[in-house]
Image (cartoon, rainbow, N blue to C red):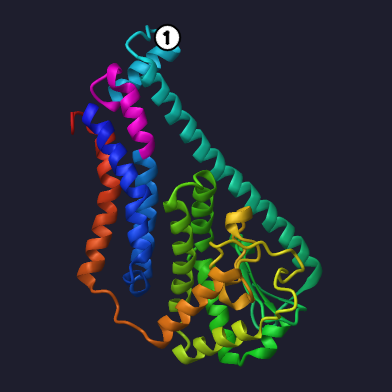
Amino acid sequence: MFWTSYFLAVLALVLAWPVPVLLSRAEWPSRAPFTAMVLWQAIALAGGLSMIGAMLVYGLEPAGDNLIAGLRTLAGMVFFNAPTTSLGFWHLFALSAAALLTAHLVFTLLLTYVKIERQRRRHRELLALLASPDAGGPGTLVINHDSPVAYCLPGGARSVTVLSDGLMAALEPNELRAVLNHENAHLSQRHDLLLWAFAAWRQALPWFPTTRLAQVAVNSLIEMLADDAALKSESKATLIRAIAIVASGASPSNPAMGPLGNKKTTTDSDSGGMVTSPAATGSDVEDSAFGGSGGAASARTTATRVSRLLSPKPPLARGFRALVLAGSALLLAVPTALLFVPGLLG
């Protein structure tokens, strides 16, 4: 297992620095946002697996010639008082680090989920007091707010899309449909789960460039995916007008306030105009570009979306998309195989 641990360590390092930097600078993701989203998820999962696996394999090297055998020996040491003399200081250190990192990642994921659920519950309580059902369709609420605001609040069967009076007054019916289709795409495609996972990943490892770059990229990609869903029923010109009207009509008097008067916390990763940034609190309450000011990153994402719609580039070639998807699968398969297939690298 000697070479396996070093290979996994190198793979983890590559996925933590050069790969996400290069991908964040690439231009092709806007031509294939779904494919790019799959690749970012593969990088995150493979990077975490390689990081933990490298330490685990190194720590278990004296206990067996593969991970399974090493874990069996370790279980004997823990539960049956087998001798631990075969494990040196650095092996025990590596095993402890792997266990602590795994616990840290799982705990952060669960803590982020608890924060999200708590904020959603509080938000629903406010909506119950301040919002009224929209006669135009089920699952849509209207709040009394002068600025154009639209966002979705995920929650399974309780998911709702929230609109403001200012938004409904500013947009034509077809533009309003484009906004609703955009927000409904966030709900139907479960973008909240992606936001949750990448927000937790960044909170767990904030010093890794890949966590920041991945969160910014994912926030931008889900907006592109929602735009593409809206374009299935409305014209490109309609969607562009909707984005431009809402972006230009946001009230500048109190840019730090969200639609329900809750203080808006933004970071450089807040590319979707979040009511409260996921990087700051774990929230995934979305209002995309249709909800007013969301910080500098939100403005950049809005500009990118409009530019993508105004000057569309041809979709990414099918062969290149297939190559990226195959590479994503390979990223996950390689560390998994190295961990569980005995003697693959020795």
**Residue that numbered label 1 is attached to:** 80
> Based on the displayed image, in which of its 4 quarters is residue 175 positioned?
bottom right
Q: Position of residue 168 (x, y in %)?
A: 67, 86
Q: Is residue 174 above or below residue 102?
A: below
Residue at image position (34%, 61%) is 23
**Residue flagged by tag 1: what amino acid is it?**
Phe
Q: Position of residue 42 (x, y in %)?
A: 35, 52
Would you say residue 81 sits in the magenta stretch?
A: no
Give left or right: position of 47 versus 319: right
Q: Is residue 212 above or below residue 244?
A: above
Q: Position of residue 13 (x, y in %)?
A: 33, 44
Q: Who is closer to the viewer here, 13 or 322?
A: 13
> Based on the displayed image, in which of its 4 quarters is residue 196 positioned?
bottom right
Q: How many marks?
A: 1
Q: Quick one: label 1, few (<14), some, or many (20+) residues within 10 Å?
A: few
User: Which segment is the magenta one?
Assistant: 51-67
Q: Who is closer to the viewer here, 245 or 175?
A: 245
